Amino acid sequence: MANQLRGNDLRQLGFPEGRAIGLALAQLQRKHLKRLSHTDQLALLNLILQTPSNFLTDLDWSHTAAALLPAPSRHIALTERKPYVTFGAEHIEAGAIHQMETAMKLPVTVAGALMPDAHFGYGLPIGGVLATDNAVIPYAVGVDIGCRMALSVFALPPQYLSQRVQELRNVLLTTTKFGNRDVFRHGQKMGHEVLERDEFASIPFLRNKHESAIAQIGTSGSGNHFVEFGIVEVTDATNEMGVPVGQYLGLLSHSGSRGLGAAVAQHYTNLAKDVCKLPAEAQHLAWLTLDSEAGQEYWAAMNLAGDYASACHHQIHQRVARALGERPLAKVENHHNFAWKERLADGREVIVHRKGATPAGKGVLGIIPGSMTAPGFIVRGRGVADSLGSASHGAGRLMSRTRAKAELGEADVRRHLQQHGVELIGGGLDEAPQAYKDIHTVMESQQDLVDVLGTFTPKIVRMDGAA
């Protein structure tokens, strides 16, 4: 086959995390199974997933089937699933729902909610919100700790975008850096107080992360991270931004804590797995209690990574504003992939993990992006208890990265961008607009969670990749 199945394809089908995925992928490499079409392979795997006991004596699939059957729990057993609320359930894949169901069986789980942009992740699904009792789950926070959206609104008319495309394109090329290799050199760097934080010295694990944090500050990651110019349309006259109703030039950025956050996530997940032995399907949900030394360390490191992510955005926006010769009229910033100490309606203090979910407490402002060719929304949270004061963090993926690369053509994507008047610098097929859900459908599913104050429509987008 030209495009073989990957682990994420099986996870989206509903395969639990563990040995079954590796065993199934290995079997598909056998000559007689390799001849099957992509569709037939998925249909066969789905049949095995639904009725594994029927395949226990099958010459090809006995080991995979055995791995799919419930394994005896190890040191910590899962409990009966607690109830949770799902928003836009009809648009959420089976793999993400399975992950949320598993998370709701943890003995430390108190409450949960699933956002309408939800899709498969590691541990907690992206779009999952989980409240726990005195426990923090590194992989329920996520690898890109404190990943966030930041918006600057400038007192420039929308025509500025169409009249100065090349100038604005050059601004993005000279003021932004993406990926692991492209960083600001000596003389281009900007300092920030976050780099002077005590945690870099007081937490042993972070001591050798300081140098890379200094190197990467002010840069953006790869994947779905971007910096883009677009049209801000303010539609709510009572908005807290203090910006009159109308259209403006806007700058929107999406990125996180770079290598620092990824290292923190991996290190403390490994520590959590050592002290919190869970069944295979829940192993990425291992937790650290907040009264343990490791839990306190992770909490401090997580907050440092979140502040570092914010500093990166501040430097991006500062550089761009300087290049434009403008000061923004207003700024809005919100983050996801984080854990907060909050109180439920009954007064209990819990740790609320929002993995790919936007804080939407009463009166809290945020940005929920669509795709390169769909508007994002500037929102005000309503503080709905059922959602644990949360909303989606975007449109959410419709296709996995593997599927997008296999099914989408570069010419079609470029044509689609051109039809919408979008100039793209970098980017790949895995981030094509067609790989994402319809943001309007997602917003319809959460209209009770947020009020819309305005929109942001992308026009000049920069991502990782060749310019």
Image: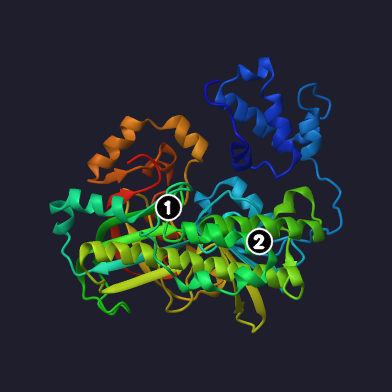
Look at the image and tell me whether residue 356 can be seen. Answer: no
Q: Nearer the viewer, residue 357 or 446?
A: 357
Label 1 sits on residue: 183
Image: 315 above or below 290? above
Marks 2 & 1, CB-CB < 8 Å contact: no
- Element type at marker 1? loop
In the rendered image, which quarter is residue 453 located in? bottom left
Residue 254 makes an appearance in the image: yes
Residue 308: x and y in percent read: 50, 66
Q: Which residue is mark 2?
A: 138
Amino acid of disc 1: Val
Question: In the image, what residue occupies the spot 45% across and 61% down?
Answer: 217
Q: Nearer the viewer, mark 2 or mark 1?
A: 1
* The C terminus sits in image quarter: top left
What residue type is disc 2 on? Pro
Residue 147 appears left or right of 62: left
Q: Earlier in the sequence, mark 2 or mark 1?
A: 2
Callout 2: 10 Å neighbours few (<14), some, many (20+)? many
Q: Nearer the viewer, residue 26 or 10?
A: 26
Q: Position of residue 80 (x, y in %)?
A: 77, 61
User: Is residue 91 positioned above or below 340 on the image?
Assistant: above
Residue at x 70% of width, y 37% of height: 21
Q: Observer-nearest residue: 241 or 464?
A: 464
| Image quarter hosting the N terminus | top right
| Above or below, 155 relative to 401 | below
Residue farthest to the bottom, as pictured: 347
